[in-house]
Amino acid sequence: MQIIQKKTSEVESDWQKEIANAFKNPIHLLNYLKIDHAPFSEGVNASRLFPMMVPRFFAGLMQMHEPADPLLKQVLPVKDEFLSVDGFTTDPLKENNHANDGVVHKYKNRVLLILKGGCAINCRYCFRRHFPYQQHHLNRALLLKALNKIESDPNIDEIILSGGDPLMANDQTLNFVVSAIEEMSNIKRIRFHTRLPVVLPSRITTGLLNTLHTSRMTISIVLHINHPNEISESLQIKCKALARRGVRLFNQAVLLKDINDSAAIQMKLNETLFESGIQPYYLHMFDKVKGASHFCVSEQTSKRIMRNVVANQSGYMVPKLVLEEPGRESKTWIDIYAD
Ligand code: SF4
């Protein structure tokens, strides 16, 4: 495979510095928000189960003095993470059965590359919170090996760059990866699954925009936004810049207890996404990952919420309610009218 890499010219240090300065200690975050940390003291140690990581930009979107803030609840370690609940496991999607040297191949026409193990934010409900990223680190040699293997499979026409978060890779690496994929005759589309532009809009650099803009591929970015309060003006500006360069923007959200489990919040989310040029795409039923059972919304409640949304909002801005079931050939679309 011969790779002709495009030039990148930007200074990336701003977003990288912001990641370095992220809140990693729950007490520091609570102090910043002027919230009494006494009621949360038993939960602080849950950051040992899964480290806390919250960029200051994202913390800036939270309400001061509000312990029930829906953004805070997504990222603050709490004592319920120590609960052991039947049916909640370390690998709820059985991805370990499909993961090989940084590649997860679950579906016929698309394959997922774990480009980076880390994220800029650690969501407490993450279904990959126990994923053995260190076993799937893609160095350049392994990446090329993986791409060669993908190129030899004519069934595959789309590559999903995921993680962790693929935008944790620097612009030079992303430019290399996109250039390498462009050389593959079977690949038509590249899809990024990322939360980074939401929690750190400065990650959408000029260099990244140039790489995406000049690619021959159809490029999609699937963002991960769960609550309308996550949609900042800075994110909207970056979304416009991406759209101007031909990047298609989608959103997938997760239904989370006491965070976005109401029709009113879902409708506000859909509307704000749509106005920001982001197409609501999937609303995921909760993946039963160990340590996060307190976020789980029942199937019955999920269907009721969605019936209410469908009855009150234009169909083109309503996402599909889906469940990921290990072994299936695609996500399962939930029939919201079935009992
Ligand atoms: S950004 Fe995505 S991959 Fe990273 S912790 Fe959150 S849910 Fe998990």
Image: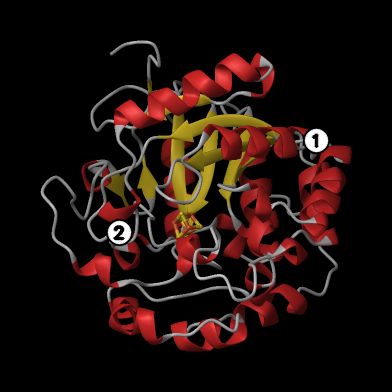
The image quarter in which residue 245 lies: top right
Query: Looking at the picture, how far across and down is residue 202, in whole percent?
Result: 77, 66
The label on residue 214 is: none
User: Would residue 46 appear left or right of 2 to someone viewing this image?
Assistant: left
Where residue 238 sits: x, y (%)?
82, 52
Query: Mark 2 sits on what residue?
Result: 131
Asked if residue 7 can be seen in this view, the reply is: no
Name the amino acid type tagged 2: Phe
Q: Please state which of residues 318 and 325 is positioned toward the viewer in this rendering.
A: 318
Q: Position of residue 216 (x, y in %)?
A: 76, 34
Residue 201 to residue 153: above or below: below
- Identified by mark 1, the residue type is Glu
Q: Could you tell me which residue is drawn at 68 percent across and 47 percent down?
A: 179
Relative to the observer, which residue lies in front, 52 or 229? 229
Residue shown at the point (61%, 85%) measured from the top left: 32
The local secondary structure at tag 2 comes to loop
Q: Quadrant of the N terminus?
A: top right
- Image coords of residue 6 (percent x, y): 79, 54
Task: State the image quarter where residue 128 is shown.
Answer: bottom left
Residue neighbourhood size for the residue with mark 1, other residues' Cα within 10 Å, grouped as few (<14), some (14–19), many (≥20) = few
Q: Quadrant of the C terminus?
A: top left
Helix, strand or loop for disc 1? helix
| Residue at image coords 38%, 76% | 51
Residue 153 in which image quadrant: top left
Residue with the mark numbered 1: 275
Disc 2 or disc 1, which is closer to the eye?
A: 1
Q: Which one is nearer the viewer's eye here, 121 or 306?
A: 306
Left or right of residue 78, residue 86 in this image:
left
Q: Is residue 293 above or below residue 264?
A: below
What residue appears at the point 75 percent right and 79 percent down from the top-left corner? 13
- Hey, which residue is sitting farthest top in the picture? 338
